Each structure stands twice: as C-alpha cells, then as structure tokens.
Image (cartoon, rainbow, N blue to C red):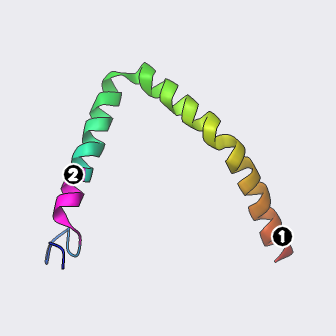
Amino acid sequence: MHRQATSGLFKGINVQVTMISIIMVTATLCYEAFFTEHLADVLERIRNLVNPFLEWYCVLLVGFYYFL
C-alpha cells in the first residue's frame, strides 16, 4: 500500500503527492499574481481553445435532456 495519511485532514490521501500539488498550485498563483498581463493572455488562449467545444457540449447536453 502507498504511504497514506491515517488521520487528520489528509486521511486516505498520498501525503507526498498532495503536498507537491499544493506547492505547485501556490507557486502558480503567486507567479500569476505578479504577472497579471501574462495570466490574461494565457486565459484568453485557453478560452479560445476550449470555447468551441463547450458550445457544442451545451447544445448536446440540452438536447439530450430535452429528449430524455
């Protein structure tokens, strides 16, 4: 069995992976807090990449529930 916490907030979670994830998210948030122009550019590119798929997903989802 992998090393998991047996009690507390992280019970049942791999502690090393959780801590690395928390550090990565915190570092990303701190970086983007100081470079907001870069964040705006990255989010715009992500939105332009994902937006066409989300539009069709919403249409299909509404259509599926309408005919269900």
Which SS does the magenta portion mostly show?
A: helix
Tell me which label, 1 or 2, sits earlier in the chain: 2
Relative placement, left or right, of 42 versus 52 is left
Q: Position of residue 48 (x, y in %)?
A: 63, 34
Q: Which residue does the image show at 73% across and 48% down from the upper left? A: 55
4 sits to left or right of 24: left
Q: Farthest residue in the front direction?
A: 1
Secondary element at image label 2: helix
Observer-nearest residue: 45 or 40?
A: 45
Name the image quarter holding residue 29.
top left
Q: Which mark is residue 37?
A: none
Q: Vertical placement of 8 versus 16: above or below?
A: below
Instruction: Tell me the residue that label 1 is attached to.
Output: 66
Q: Quadrant of the N terminus?
A: bottom left
Tag 1: amino acid: Tyr
Looking at the picture, how far across and down is residue 51, in whole percent? 67, 41
Vertical relation: 3 (above or below) 60: below
**Residue annotated with mark 2:** 20
Residue 45, position in %: x, y? 56, 31
Q: Nearer the viewer, residue 65 or 53?
A: 53
Is 17 contained in the magenta span?
yes
| Residue beneath the point at 22% across and 46% down | 23
User: Which segment did they paint magenta?
Assistant: 13-20
Whether residue 42 appears in magenta in the rendering, the answer is: no
Residue shown at the point (27%, 32%) measured from the top left? 30
CA–CA distance in space, label 1 to label 2 = 43 Å
Residue 64 vs 45, above or below: the answer is: below
Q: Quadrant of residue 33?
A: top left
The correct choice, above or below, for 8 with respect to 34 in the image is: below
Residue 43 located left or right of residue 23 = right
